[in-house]
Amino acid sequence: MAPGIPSAMERPHFIGIGGAGMSGIAKILTRRGAKVAGSDSKESATADALRALGATVHIGHTAGHLADDATCVVVSSAIRADNPELVRAGDLAIPVVHRSDALASLMEGLRPIAVAGTHGKTTTTSMLAVALTELGLDPSYAIGGDLAGPGTNATHGEGAIFVAEADESDRSFHKYDPEVAIVLNVELDHHANYASMDEIYDSFETFVGKVVPDGTLVVSADQAGAVELTRRVRDLSALKVVTYGESASADVRVHKITQRGLTSEVTVVLNGKYLTFTVSVPGRHYALNAVAALAAGVALGIPAHNLASALGKYTGVKRRLQLKGEAAGVQVIDSYAHHPTEMTADLEAMRGAASDARLLVVFQPHLFSRTQELGTEMGQALALADASVVLDIYPAREDPIPGITSTLIIDAAQAAGADVTAVHDKATVPEVIAGMAKPGDLVLTMGAGDVTDLGPQILDHLSS
């Protein structure tokens, strides 16, 4: 058995290896010396990156892609029971391991930081990964997006700290035993798996209950759901609770956030002392993510002033207000926001970064269930833009729900006074936006689906 590899992970096969969460685990295992293989639905830069590390990546899903000597098959909640590789795993009696169990096994013997919350997980995990790397601590990390600097979503480090994004969507974050848990916010989302806020709270309570004895919960003092969660878990024995935010009661209190174009300057009060540092992305919510990262690092015993300086080295994550380019005087920026709270935060951040610019949005709703529950709020968020184009719903893992279309969002946006246009053919969007945009405008492609592909195409049309 290769050092640092659980025996079940010596020859893993990943179904959907190109996914953000799956590819990260595959990369870490490959770097630890495992013989990694897997399949994905299409070619991608991620598939090429995995091959460059030594992994075998097949395109398409067929039973023959699964080797007889695989020690396990790794799946996410998105993999359906009739997937031919999963069926073959059953025929061969090869153990099937959920992605979260695979990730949990990689954390064993290390000092895990698990970052949870309805929004902001990827950014906060990334900030910690960058800062700890900058300080020479050589952490391992697994993130749901590629860091703008290193260009990867995961790495195996030789240090003692493992930073992981903890996904609440399918309750998989219950598998982790972190030394430090971060909860950024608690809101109702993932409607296919949670029927109520009570179910959400129960799930987050279970996650917090997994923090190791004498471990620390870092939690927002501002967001209502996080405050309620704190009230519910305060009495857990051997749990240290550190709150952060703009609330006067916060243990790590934000004194001031000053936006300076596409960056922010943050001043916090920690242990009675003022500490100021720069965050190289715009918006109050990103500044608060950085403060959460600061509090978590301090909980591990890292000096606050060192962390503050290192956090300034963070330059962003792909798809989190990522500048894709500029053409004809128009900047095109990409946003992963797909929940109304995220949409509002990113639109407000862009308003603050360029208050005189006209803001045009290309929004692609993500999931029928989310649109059914939150479509009205999505439309209301779009009222913050000067004009929006709304695409059809990106289904991802879901089947259509009768009567649920992007019209629900468009109607709500128009009722809120927004200028909204429906576009059903995604291929026509670059031409539509090029016809709308004028020099000085900002164009924001927004959503968790393949809307991200439109940024370069819009730039090409603007240049022609």
Image (cartoon, grey):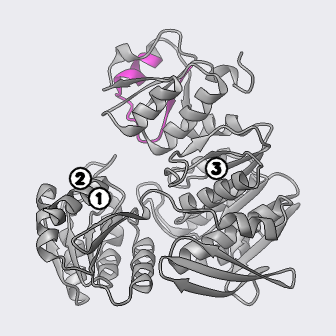
Could you tell me residue 4's position as x and y percent? 73, 27
CA neighbours of label 3 inside 10 A, class few (<14), some (14 to 19), many (20+) = many
Dot label at residue 368: 1
* Residue at 82%, 63% in the rendered image: 299
Query: For this rendering, which residue is in front, 188 or 418?
Result: 418
Q: Amino acid at mark 2?
A: Pro
Instruction: Find the distance from the CA under tag 1 to the CA under tag 3.
Output: 28 Å
Can the viewer see residue 457?
yes
Q: Which residue is mark 2?
A: 400
Dot label at residue 232: none
Point out the stretch of residues depicted in magenta. Answer: 72-89
Could you tell me residue 410's position as x and y percent? 20, 76
Could you tell me if the residues under marks 1 and 3 are in contact, i.e. CB atoms within 8 Å?
no
**What kind of element bears circle 3?**
strand
| Image position of 397 with respect to 203: above or below | above
Could you tell me if the residues under marks 1 and 2 are in contact, i.e. CB atoms within 8 Å?
yes
| Image position of 174 with respect to 359: above or below | above
Q: Which residue is mark 3?
A: 164
Query: For this rendering, which residue is in front, 174 or 48?
Result: 48
**What kind of element bears circle 2?**
loop
**What kind of element bears circle 1?**
helix
Which badge, 1 or 2, comes first in the chain's sequence? 1
Which badge, 2 or 3, comes first in the chain's sequence? 3
* Residue at 64%, 58% in the rendered image: 115
Q: Amino acid at mark 1?
A: Phe
Residue at the top extreme, as displayed? 68
- Quadrant position of the N terminus in the picture: top right
Query: For this rendering, which residue is in front, 229 or 269?
Result: 269
* Residue at 64%, 46% in the rendered image: 141
Q: Nearer the viewer, mark 1 or mark 3?
A: 3
* Residue at 58%, 87% in the rendered image: 258
